[in-house]
Image (cartoon, rainbow, N blue to C red):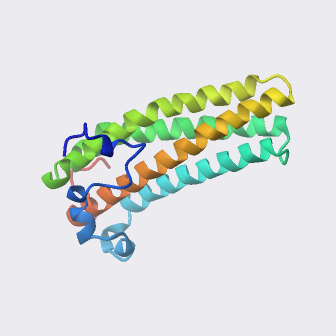
Protein backbone atom coordinates (compact mmCIF):
# COMPACT_ATOMS: atom_id res chain seq x y z
CA UNK A 1 0.00 0.00 0.00
CA UNK A 2 2.18 2.86 -1.23
CA UNK A 3 1.43 6.29 0.22
CA UNK A 4 1.68 7.67 -3.31
CA UNK A 5 -1.68 6.01 -4.08
CA UNK A 6 -3.97 8.96 -4.96
CA UNK A 7 -6.90 7.17 -3.28
CA UNK A 8 -5.11 7.59 0.07
CA UNK A 9 -4.88 11.39 -0.17
CA UNK A 10 -6.72 13.06 2.67
CA UNK A 11 -8.99 15.10 0.41
CA UNK A 12 -10.34 11.99 -1.39
CA UNK A 13 -9.99 9.16 1.12
CA UNK A 14 -13.25 7.75 2.46
CA UNK A 15 -11.68 5.71 5.26
CA UNK A 16 -8.72 3.58 6.16
CA UNK A 17 -7.75 0.91 3.62
CA UNK A 18 -8.72 -2.63 4.63
CA UNK A 19 -5.08 -3.55 5.33
CA UNK A 20 -5.01 -0.94 8.11
CA UNK A 21 -8.33 -1.96 9.63
CA UNK A 22 -7.12 -5.31 11.02
CA UNK A 23 -7.06 -4.15 14.64
CA UNK A 24 -10.29 -2.19 14.22
CA UNK A 25 -11.99 -5.45 13.25
CA UNK A 26 -10.70 -6.98 16.49
CA UNK A 27 -11.60 -3.85 18.52
CA UNK A 28 -14.62 -2.22 16.85
CA UNK A 29 -15.56 1.32 17.80
CA UNK A 30 -18.85 0.19 19.38
CA UNK A 31 -16.96 -1.69 22.09
CA UNK A 32 -14.26 0.83 22.95
CA UNK A 33 -15.86 2.43 26.00
CA UNK A 34 -16.65 -0.95 27.56
CA UNK A 35 -13.02 -2.07 27.29
CA UNK A 36 -11.07 -1.72 30.58
CA UNK A 37 -8.16 -0.15 28.65
CA UNK A 38 -10.33 2.71 27.41
CA UNK A 39 -9.59 5.12 30.26
CA UNK A 40 -6.59 7.40 30.52
CA UNK A 41 -4.75 8.11 27.30
CA UNK A 42 -7.53 6.96 24.98
CA UNK A 43 -10.19 9.07 26.68
CA UNK A 44 -7.84 12.05 26.68
CA UNK A 45 -7.05 11.58 22.98
CA UNK A 46 -10.71 11.30 22.01
CA UNK A 47 -11.57 14.33 24.15
CA UNK A 48 -8.97 16.36 22.27
CA UNK A 49 -10.48 15.25 18.97
CA UNK A 50 -13.95 16.16 20.23
CA UNK A 51 -12.63 19.59 21.17
CA UNK A 52 -11.32 20.12 17.62
CA UNK A 53 -14.66 19.04 16.14
CA UNK A 54 -16.56 21.38 18.47
CA UNK A 55 -14.26 24.27 17.64
CA UNK A 56 -14.80 23.69 13.93
CA UNK A 57 -18.57 23.61 14.48
CA UNK A 58 -18.42 26.87 16.45
CA UNK A 59 -16.23 28.55 13.84
CA UNK A 60 -18.62 27.46 11.10
CA UNK A 61 -21.74 28.53 13.00
CA UNK A 62 -20.25 31.92 13.84
CA UNK A 63 -19.17 32.54 10.22
CA UNK A 64 -22.68 31.67 9.06
CA UNK A 65 -24.08 34.03 11.69
CA UNK A 66 -21.82 36.85 10.52
CA UNK A 67 -22.86 36.33 6.90
CA UNK A 68 -26.60 36.27 7.60
CA UNK A 69 -26.45 39.14 10.09
CA UNK A 70 -27.16 37.24 13.32
CA UNK A 71 -23.75 38.19 14.75
CA UNK A 72 -22.43 41.72 14.94
CA UNK A 73 -19.27 42.13 12.80
CA UNK A 74 -17.18 43.42 15.72
CA UNK A 75 -18.35 40.63 18.01
CA UNK A 76 -17.61 38.11 15.26
CA UNK A 77 -14.10 39.50 14.75
CA UNK A 78 -13.37 39.22 18.48
CA UNK A 79 -14.66 35.65 18.64
CA UNK A 80 -12.79 34.66 15.49
CA UNK A 81 -9.52 36.08 16.78
CA UNK A 82 -9.88 34.29 20.11
CA UNK A 83 -11.25 30.92 18.92
CA UNK A 84 -9.36 30.86 15.63
CA UNK A 85 -6.03 31.49 17.29
CA UNK A 86 -6.69 28.82 19.88
CA UNK A 87 -7.79 26.33 17.22
CA UNK A 88 -4.65 26.79 15.10
CA UNK A 89 -2.30 26.65 18.08
CA UNK A 90 -3.97 23.63 19.71
CA UNK A 91 -4.19 21.62 16.48
CA UNK A 92 -0.62 22.41 15.46
CA UNK A 93 0.68 21.46 18.91
CA UNK A 94 -1.40 18.27 18.93
CA UNK A 95 0.04 17.20 15.58
CA UNK A 96 3.61 17.98 16.64
CA UNK A 97 3.30 15.78 19.74
CA UNK A 98 1.77 12.96 17.69
CA UNK A 99 4.39 13.14 14.93
CA UNK A 100 7.41 13.31 17.21
CA UNK A 101 6.36 11.23 20.20
CA UNK A 102 3.27 9.05 19.82
CA UNK A 103 3.32 7.90 16.19
CA UNK A 104 6.91 6.57 16.29
CA UNK A 105 6.16 4.61 19.48
CA UNK A 106 2.77 3.32 18.32
CA UNK A 107 4.11 2.26 14.90
CA UNK A 108 6.37 -0.31 16.54
CA UNK A 109 3.53 -2.07 18.39
CA UNK A 110 2.08 -3.87 15.34
CA UNK A 111 3.95 -3.96 12.03
CA UNK A 112 0.73 -4.73 10.11
CA UNK A 113 -0.40 -1.16 10.56
CA UNK A 114 2.96 0.60 10.56
CA UNK A 115 2.22 2.37 7.27
CA UNK A 116 -0.93 3.77 8.86
CA UNK A 117 1.22 6.10 10.92
CA UNK A 118 2.98 7.26 7.77
CA UNK A 119 -0.48 7.97 6.35
CA UNK A 120 -1.46 9.99 9.43
CA UNK A 121 1.81 11.91 9.25
CA UNK A 122 1.10 12.67 5.57
CA UNK A 123 -2.33 13.93 6.66
CA UNK A 124 -0.66 16.35 9.04
CA UNK A 125 1.41 17.70 6.15
CA UNK A 126 -1.79 18.09 4.11
CA UNK A 127 -3.49 19.91 7.00
CA UNK A 128 -0.62 22.38 7.54
CA UNK A 129 -1.38 24.43 4.39
CA UNK A 130 -5.05 24.43 5.36
CA UNK A 131 -4.11 25.94 8.73
CA UNK A 132 -2.18 28.65 6.89
CA UNK A 133 -5.18 29.23 4.60
CA UNK A 134 -7.35 29.43 7.73
CA UNK A 135 -5.05 32.02 9.33
CA UNK A 136 -4.85 34.05 6.12
CA UNK A 137 -8.64 34.00 5.73
CA UNK A 138 -9.20 35.00 9.36
CA UNK A 139 -6.71 37.85 8.97
CA UNK A 140 -8.53 39.09 5.85
CA UNK A 141 -11.73 39.21 7.89
CA UNK A 142 -10.03 41.06 10.74
CA UNK A 143 -8.56 43.63 8.30
CA UNK A 144 -11.74 44.02 6.22
CA UNK A 145 -13.01 47.56 5.83
CA UNK A 146 -16.75 47.91 5.79
CA UNK A 147 -19.62 45.44 6.06
CA UNK A 148 -19.59 44.27 2.43
CA UNK A 149 -15.87 43.51 2.36
CA UNK A 150 -16.17 41.79 5.75
CA UNK A 151 -19.11 39.67 4.60
CA UNK A 152 -17.29 38.72 1.38
CA UNK A 153 -14.13 37.78 3.29
CA UNK A 154 -16.23 35.73 5.71
CA UNK A 155 -17.94 33.94 2.81
CA UNK A 156 -14.59 32.92 1.32
CA UNK A 157 -13.36 31.90 4.78
CA UNK A 158 -16.48 29.80 5.35
CA UNK A 159 -15.97 27.90 2.07
CA UNK A 160 -12.39 27.08 3.08
CA UNK A 161 -13.53 26.21 6.59
CA UNK A 162 -16.08 23.69 5.33
CA UNK A 163 -13.47 21.97 3.16
CA UNK A 164 -11.05 21.90 6.06
CA UNK A 165 -13.75 20.53 8.36
CA UNK A 166 -14.40 17.58 6.03
CA UNK A 167 -10.70 16.78 5.74
CA UNK A 168 -10.00 17.23 9.44
CA UNK A 169 -12.91 14.98 10.39
CA UNK A 170 -11.67 12.31 7.96
CA UNK A 171 -8.20 12.52 9.51
CA UNK A 172 -9.45 12.45 13.11
CA UNK A 173 -11.73 9.49 12.42
CA UNK A 174 -8.97 7.52 10.68
CA UNK A 175 -6.53 8.39 13.44
CA UNK A 176 -8.97 7.18 16.09
CA UNK A 177 -9.66 3.95 14.21
CA UNK A 178 -5.95 3.24 13.95
CA UNK A 179 -4.71 4.37 17.36
CA UNK A 180 -7.45 3.32 19.77
CA UNK A 181 -7.35 -0.37 18.77
CA UNK A 182 -3.53 -0.37 19.04
CA UNK A 183 -3.69 0.96 22.60
CA UNK A 184 -6.55 -1.34 23.55
CA UNK A 185 -4.59 -4.35 22.31
CA UNK A 186 -1.07 -3.47 23.43
CA UNK A 187 -1.55 -0.93 26.23
CA UNK A 188 0.40 2.26 26.85
CA UNK A 189 3.79 0.82 27.83
CA UNK A 190 6.53 2.66 25.98
CA UNK A 191 4.32 5.65 25.17
CA UNK A 192 5.08 9.16 26.41
CA UNK A 193 3.41 9.81 29.76
Horizontal arrangement in the rendering, residue 29 relative to residue 86 (left or right): left
Q: Nearer the viewer, residue 173 or 32?
A: 173
Q: Residue at x 36, y 71 (%)?
A: 32
Q: Position of residue 51 (x, y in %)?
A: 54, 53
From the top left corner, tell me how far across and down residue 86 is, in percent. 59, 38
Front-lying residue, 16 or 33: 16
Examine the image and state in which quarter residue 85 appears: top right
> How many marks overall?
0
The residue at 54%/47% (across/down) is: 165
> Residue 169, how many percent across, how many down?
48, 51
Location of residue 32 with respect to 91 vertically, above or below: below
In the picture, measured across the screen, residue 4 lies left or right of residue 135, that is left
User: Which residue is drawn at the image coordinates 20% and 62% (left, top)?
Assistant: 186
Seen from the viewer's position, the closer of residues 25 and 91 is 25
Vertical position of residue 102 compared to residue 127: above or below: below
Which residue reaches farthest left?
Answer: 111
Residue in the image at 85% along x and 41% along y: 72
Residue 153, relative to residue 183: is it above or below?
Answer: above
User: Residue 23 at x, y = what percent?
Assistant: 23, 64
Amino acid sequence: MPLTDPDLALDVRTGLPDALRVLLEEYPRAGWEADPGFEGLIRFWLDRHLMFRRMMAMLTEEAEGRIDGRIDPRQYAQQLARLGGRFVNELHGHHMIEDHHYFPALATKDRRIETGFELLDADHHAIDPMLQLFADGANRILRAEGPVQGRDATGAFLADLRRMDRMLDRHLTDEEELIVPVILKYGTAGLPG
